[in-house]
Amino acid sequence: MRFAVAKQQGLSEELVSQIDADYQLSALDHRQKLAVAFADHFLGATGPVPPSLDEALAAEFTSEQLGELAVGMSLFHGFSKLMIALGCEPEQMDTTELPTPDVRRAP
């Protein structure tokens, strides 16, 4: 699944293909590698984020951006577990582009 704004901001399938076990050695930029490191730690459920990663994340992302990353991962991870538990996990899934949700803030 890809949000349209991510693609508009440069997300390509070539970049996505670099998100694997060796992502630290990939051509992903520093910010992208930090986001993947956060995702690895978050989804691995290994306890609190280590201080070194926490400091690096705080230097690169706002608290709102980190919250958005965490909520997004929670939702996608939870729904994937639900699909598996219900026996609905497809053998193959096409990449789907979704319009980015329009967040309107109160004045």
Image (tube, rainbow, N blue to C red):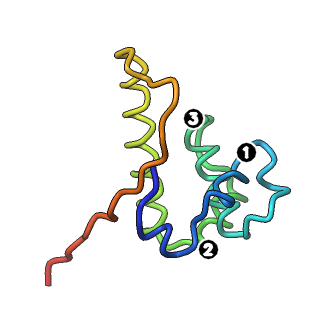
Q: Earlier in the sequence, mark 3 or mark 1?
A: 1
Measure the alpha-carbon separation of dots 3 and 1: 18 Å
Residue nearest the viewer, comparing 43 with 26: 26
Up/down of 68 relative to 41, above or below: below
Instruction: Residue at 52% x, 30% y: name it.
Output: 92
Instruction: Residue at 39% x, 51% y: name it.
Output: 71
Name the amino acid type tagged 2. Answer: Glu
* Residue for badge 1: 20
Helix, strand or loop status at disc 3: loop
Relative horizontal placement of residue 24, taking residue 85 as reference (left or right):
right
The crowding category of the residue bearing disc 3, from other C-alpha atoms within 10 Å (few below 14, some 14 to 19, many at least 20), is few
Q: Position of residue 3 (x, y in %)?
A: 42, 60
Up/down of 96 relative to 53, above or below: above
Instruction: Residue at 63% x, 74% y: name it.
Output: 59
The crowding category of the residue bearing disc 2, from other C-alpha atoms within 10 Å (few below 14, some 14 to 19, many at least 20), is some
Q: Earlier in the sequence, mark 2 or mark 3?
A: 3
Q: Earlier in the sequence, mark 2 or mark 1?
A: 1
* Residue for badge 2: 60
Q: Position of residue 24 (x, y in %)?
A: 80, 55
Instruction: Residue at 42% x, 43% y: name it.
Output: 74
Up/down of 78 relative to 54, above or below: above
**Residue furthest to the right:** 25
Residue nearest the viewer, comparing 84 with 64: 84
Measure the alpha-carbon separation of dots 2 and 3: 22 Å
Asked if the residue at tag 3 contacts the one at tag 2, i.e. Cβ–Cβ closer than 8 Å, the answer is no
* Residue for badge 3: 45
Name the amino acid type tagged 1. Answer: Asp
